[in-house]
């Protein structure tokens, strides 16, 4: 009984421990966008997060996150707690990604993560002029106001577009337009975009969306595949271990495909 009580107190402290404000500002900024598997559902069940932080996701004083109030603070999971509101956020790929690039790319300085993902959203909700799109652009622009550079947009979304065939068939064009709009409105014409091909979906047109994602051949767009990563019992969300694995895959993709751009 005593051990169970101590474990419960540890979990509560992890969930409600205040974020650590910092006077640092990032040099290398990454936008995290999409829906629930980017926001992070690792370690969540029945509306609660277990508070367990994998070693690959441990906080680092030189990895920051932009809060909902546009303040930089030391990053720690759940990264999207004040962004994907109304839902229970847990471990996502962001912290494993940030630790991965820090450990394997010496030119990376202070990392800034900009959480923007919102669970249950279709790509049509991210088109130019929508609330989610405008918020992403506003947060991205705000993140660079101290001189840091946006190095890449990490995008994991599409599960909600697998329900209706018309949405799945329109996905490629919608994603290509979104990339063009973001590059234009952020005034970074060739900002790298690393998208994730789906591991799951809410409907039966998963393969249609996956084919659309894998078929995008725009310059500086990389697609990594989440298919085969273990899912939770809901058959929709990645497990904690899968989120970590995905984050490390994203880090490897950035370093190998776009690391050369850090010299610019």
Image (spheres, rainbow, N blue to C red):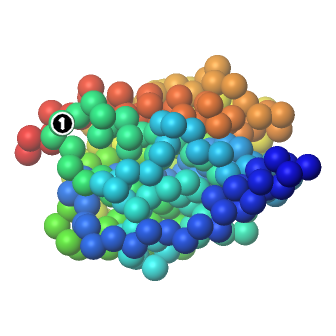
Q: Is 209 left or right of 222, judged from the image as shown?
A: right
Seen at 31% across and 47% down, the residue is 152
How many labels sit on residues?
1
Residue farthest top in this picture: 228
Quarter of the picture holding the C terminus: top left
Asked which quadrant contains residue 262, the reply is: top left
Q: Is residue 89 visible?
A: no
Q: Is 106 left or right of 156, judged from the image as shown?
A: left
Q: Is 73 left or right of 50, judged from the image as shown?
A: left
Secondary element at image label 1: loop
Question: Could you classify mark 1 by the number of other residues whose Cα lies within 10 Å: few (under 14), some (14-19), or many (20 or more)?
Answer: few
Image coordinates of residue 130 in percent, x first then y, are 53, 70
User: In the depicted view, which residue is nearer to us: 5 or 209?
Assistant: 5
Seen at 65% across and 68% down, the residue is 16
Residue farthest right in this picture: 1
Asked which quadrant contains residue 108, the reply is: top left
Image coordinates of residue 226 in percent, x first then y, are 57, 27
Asked which quadrant contains residue 170, the reply is: top right
For label 1, the residue is: 106
Residue farthest front in this picture: 2
Q: Is residue 227 visible?
A: yes
Residue farthest bottom in this picture: 69
Image coordinates of residue 25 in percent, x first then y, are 25, 66
Image coordinates of residue 99 in percent, x first then y, are 38, 40
Seen at 65% across and 45% down, the residue is 52
User: In the depicted view, which residue is nearer to us: 62 or 88?
Assistant: 62
């Amino acid at each position: 009984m005593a051990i169970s009580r101590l474990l419960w107190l540890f979990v509560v402290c992890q969930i409600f421990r205040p974020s650590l404000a910092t006077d640092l500002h990032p040099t290398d900024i990454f936008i995290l966008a999409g829906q629930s598997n980017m926001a992070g559902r690792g370690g969540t069940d029945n509306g609660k997060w277990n508070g367990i932080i994998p070693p690959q996701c441990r906080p680092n004083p030189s990895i920051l996150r932009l809060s909902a109030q546009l303040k930089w603070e030391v990053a720690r999971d759940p990264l999207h707690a004040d962004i994907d509101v109304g839902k229970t956020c847990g471990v996502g790929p962001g912290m494993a990604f940030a630790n991965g690039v820090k450990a394997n790319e010496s030119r990376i300085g202070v990392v800034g993560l900009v959480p923007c993902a919102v669970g249950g959203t279709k790509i049509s909700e991210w088109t130019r002029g929508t609330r989610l799109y405008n918020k992403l652009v506003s947060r991205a622009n705000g993140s660079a106001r101290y001189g840091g550079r946006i190095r890449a947009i990490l995008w994991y979304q599409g599960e909600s577009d697998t329900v209706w065939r018309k949405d799945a068939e329109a996905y490629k064009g919608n994603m290509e337009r979104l990339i063009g709009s973001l590059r234009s409105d952020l005034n970074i014409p060739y900002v790298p975009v690393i998208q994730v091909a789906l591991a799951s979906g809410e409907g039966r047109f998963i393969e249609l969306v996956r084919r659309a994602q894998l078929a995008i051949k725009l310059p500086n767009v990389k697609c990594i595949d989440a298919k085969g990563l273990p899912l939770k019992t809901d058959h929709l969300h990645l497990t904690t271990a899968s989120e970590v694995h995905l984050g490390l895959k994203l880090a490897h993709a950035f370093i190998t495909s776009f690391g050369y751009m850090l010299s610019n």
